[in-house]
Amino acid sequence: MCAAIGVATGIATALWSPLHGLSAAFAIPVYGLVLGFHALPGVIAQQVLRLPWVALITHALAALIASAFVPVMAGRYLMAALVFGGVQEGVSALTRYRHWETWRFLLSGFVTGAVLAVPMWFAFDVASLSPWAGITFVVAFVLGPVAWTAVGLAIGTALRRAGVARATVKR
C-alpha cells in the first residue's frame, strides 16, 4: 500500500513541481500553499493504513519517484519527505498511534506549516517584503499543509470506504 500511494503521489509531485518555481519566483507570499501539497503521501497512507511508520515510508517512496522525473528537485523532495513525514509520524507517536481522528491529522498539518515557515521566512527574505506579504506568507504556510491534509484525508477516507484497508491488520 505504501508503494502504491508513494508512486501515485510521487508522480503527482513531479507534475506539481513547476508550481514551485513559479510561486517562488513570482508569488512568494503564497508559496506555503504550493509546498503544503507535500502533506499528501503521509496523510493518505496514515488514513488508509493507520499503522506506525507508513507516513515516513510513503513520503520517502514518493520523493524517490518524483526525483526520477525531476532530478534537479531530488534534494528538496527528500527534505520535504523528512519534514512532512517526520512531523506526521511524530504527532502520531505522541498519540501512541491510537488517535486517527481528523483533529490529529490537522494538528500535524499545522505543526508542519509552523516548522517550515521559520526557515522559509529567512530563505525568501520575507522581512524585506511588504507587511501584507509577510502576513500572507505566514498564513499560507500554516494553512497550506492544513488544507492539503484535508484533501489527503478525503482521498484516504474514500480509499478506506472502497475497501482498500480491509486487508491491513496491526500485529
Image (cartoon, rainbow, N blue to C red):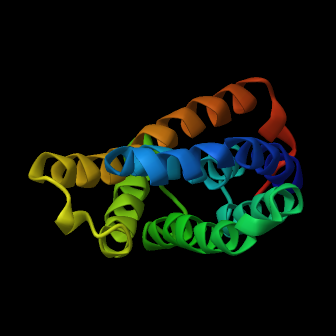
Seen at 78% across and 40% down, the residue is: 165
Instruction: Tell me the quarter of the picture where residue 56 sits.
Output: bottom right
Task: Determine whether 86 is above or below 84 in the image.
Answer: below
Q: In the image as oriented, which residue stretches furthest toward the left?
A: 131
In the visual, does 33 lie left or right of 140?
right
What is the x, y in percent for residue 90?
Answer: 49, 73
Name the residue nearer the viewer: 82 or 94. Answer: 82
Quadrant where the image shows the C terminus: bottom right
Q: Decide if residue 36 is in sight here.
A: no
User: Is 48 on the left or on the right of 92, as rendered?
Assistant: right
Q: Considering depth in this image, is 140 or 125 the residue closer to the camera?
A: 125
Residue 162 lies, with reference to residue 106, above or below; the image says: above
In the image, residue 156 lies at what x, y percent? 66, 36
> Of 19 and 88, which appears nearest the observer?
19
Query: Residue 152's image quarter?
Result: top right
- Relative horizontal placement of residue 4, taking residue 12 as reference (left or right): right
Q: Looking at the image, which residue is at 51% across and 52% down?
A: 35
Residue 127: image quadrant is: bottom left
Q: Measured from the top left, where is residue 135 in percent x and y?
A: 16, 50
Of the pair 147 and 26, the residue shown nearer to us: 26
> Measured from the top left, where is residue 168 in percent x and y?
82, 50
- Residue drawn at (82%, 66%), measured in percent from left and top? 71
Q: Is residue 42 visible?
A: yes
